[in-house]
Image (spheres, rainbow, N blue to C red):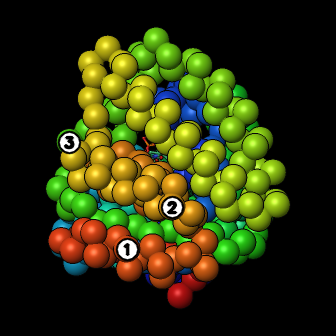
């Protein structure tokens, strides 16, 4: 039996978003979602059995609050045989300013590491279901390339699966706008969004968009993928503005990037936006257009940093 295990999992960006829960404790979503796992951004996590009285976390070389991972480990202790306390050492290789959700890669890496140290069968459906309990989006980071998280109806039926395990030439340009802590957590933000009078319409539309997105990915049609993803993301943010206590993740910089992306599209380049729970923008394009867009964006926004990511990932052991 191994006493220490290290796993790596990559972050993902949803093309069809998860933005609302039907069960908060179980992280059951109101919509199914679809994402691309990114090759270059990941979390590496080591787990070790310890004699100490509590679970502990060292995050990016600093001792950190372990409440959330301890709750996750306790959930695993009830789902499987009980096990001793765990020391977790985790490092995020994610540009902190880019608004990339490290909770997805973190809980996917922690799940993978725990499955190995506990010698559980590595059934990806089961790993995804468990990762979901840590953070909803982590369910998708168990898989490389494209994954669909089927919303399901209970703890057993809600998990992600690989949808299209191929790099189809989609590029994401990640604009680093703000390193500030987001003022509204996704968990809180999505609960508020669910109070918007238009929320149920967004949920219904999302189900149609998911099917359109699946066929666009199968056809490797980047323009169709971009148009659907952009519409789905802007619709998600509209719910935040229309809910009972309205809020907005967009800043002036966000709007300037969106406008410039639209300008690039109207001048004949493949360029679309998607935006998560923060002001940062990810620009969807293809390999052939990526350098042209980078040159344009860097000239237009010299104060910003732009990174490029492609499809890849999936968990691995180190
Ligand atoms: C997504 N986001 O589908 C959506 C789009 C952000 C915007 O999943 O409460 O950190 O831990 O389940 O997974 C971020 O939410 O939320 C997220 P919890 P999570 O990627």
Which quadrant does ligand 1 occupy? top left
Badge 2 is on which residue?
267
Q: Which mark is residue 115?
A: none
Q: Neighbour class for label 1 at 10 Å: few (<14), some, many (≥20)?
A: some
Q: Is residue 61 left or right of residue 202?
A: left
Ligand 1 near label 2 (Cβ, under 8 Å)? no
Relative height, residue 64 to residue 32 (above, below): below
Q: Is residue 122 visible?
A: yes
C-alpha gap between disc 1 and disc 2: 12 Å
N-terminal of the pair, mark 1 or mark 2, is: 2
Ligand 1 near label 3 (Cβ, under 8 Å)? no
Q: Under tag 2, what secondary structure? A: loop
Residue shown at the point (75%, 43%) measured from the top left: 212
Badge 1 is on which residue?
296
C-alpha gap between disc 3 and disc 2: 35 Å
Q: Neighbour class for label 3 at 10 Å: few (<14), some, many (≥20)?
A: few
C-alpha gap between disc 1 and disc 3: 30 Å
Q: Residue furthest front?
A: 267
Q: Nearer the viewer, mark 3 or mark 2?
A: 2
Q: Is residue 102 visible?
A: no
Q: Which mark is residue 183?
A: 3
Residue shown at the point (61%, 48%) measured from the top left: 227
N-terminal of the pair, mark 3 or mark 2, is: 3
Whether residues under marks 3 and 2 lie with C-beta atoms below 8 angstroms apart, the answer is no
Ligand 1 near label 1 (Cβ, under 8 Å)? no
Residue shown at the point (71%, 67%) measured from the top left: 122
């Amino acid at each position: 039996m191994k006493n220490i295990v290290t796993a790596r999992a990559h972050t993902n960006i949803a093309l069809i978003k998860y933005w609302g829960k039907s069960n908060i404790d179980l992280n059951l979503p109101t919509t199914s979602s679809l994402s691309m796992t990114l090759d270059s951004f990941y979390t590496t996590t080591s787990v070790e059995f310890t004699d100490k009285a509590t679970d502990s976390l060292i995050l990016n070389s600093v001792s950190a609050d372990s409440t959330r991972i301890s709750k996750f480990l306790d959930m695993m202790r009830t789902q499987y045989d009980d096990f001793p306390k765990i020391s977790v050492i985790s490092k995020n290789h994610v540009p902190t300013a880019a608004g990339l959700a490290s909770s997805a890669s973190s809980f996917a890496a922690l799940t993978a590491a725990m499955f190995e140290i506990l010698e559980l069968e590595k059934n990806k459906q089961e790993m995804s279901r468990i990762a979901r309990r840590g953070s909803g989006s982590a369910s998708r980071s168990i898989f490389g390339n494209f994954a669909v998280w089927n919303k399901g109806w209970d703890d057993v039926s809600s998990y992600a699966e690989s949808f299209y395990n191929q790099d189809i030439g989609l590029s994401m340009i990640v604009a680093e706008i703000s390193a500030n802590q987001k003022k509204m957590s996704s968990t809180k933000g999505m609960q508020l969004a669910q109070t918007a009078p238009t929320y149920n319409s967004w949920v219904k539309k999302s189900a149609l968009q998911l099917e359109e997105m699946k066929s666009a990915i199968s056809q490797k049609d980047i323009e169709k993928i971009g148009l659907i993803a952009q519409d789905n993301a802007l619709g998600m943010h509209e719910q935040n503005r229309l809910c009972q206590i309205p809020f907005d993740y967009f800043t002036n910089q966000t709007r300037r990037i969106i406008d410039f992306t639209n300008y690039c599209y109207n001048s004949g380049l493949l360029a679309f936006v998607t935006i998560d729970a923060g002001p940062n923008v990810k620009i969807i394009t293809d390999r052939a257009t990526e350098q042209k867009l980078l040159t344009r964006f860097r000239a237009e926004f010299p104060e910003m940093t732009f990174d490029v990511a492609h499809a890849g990932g999936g968990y691995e052991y180190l």
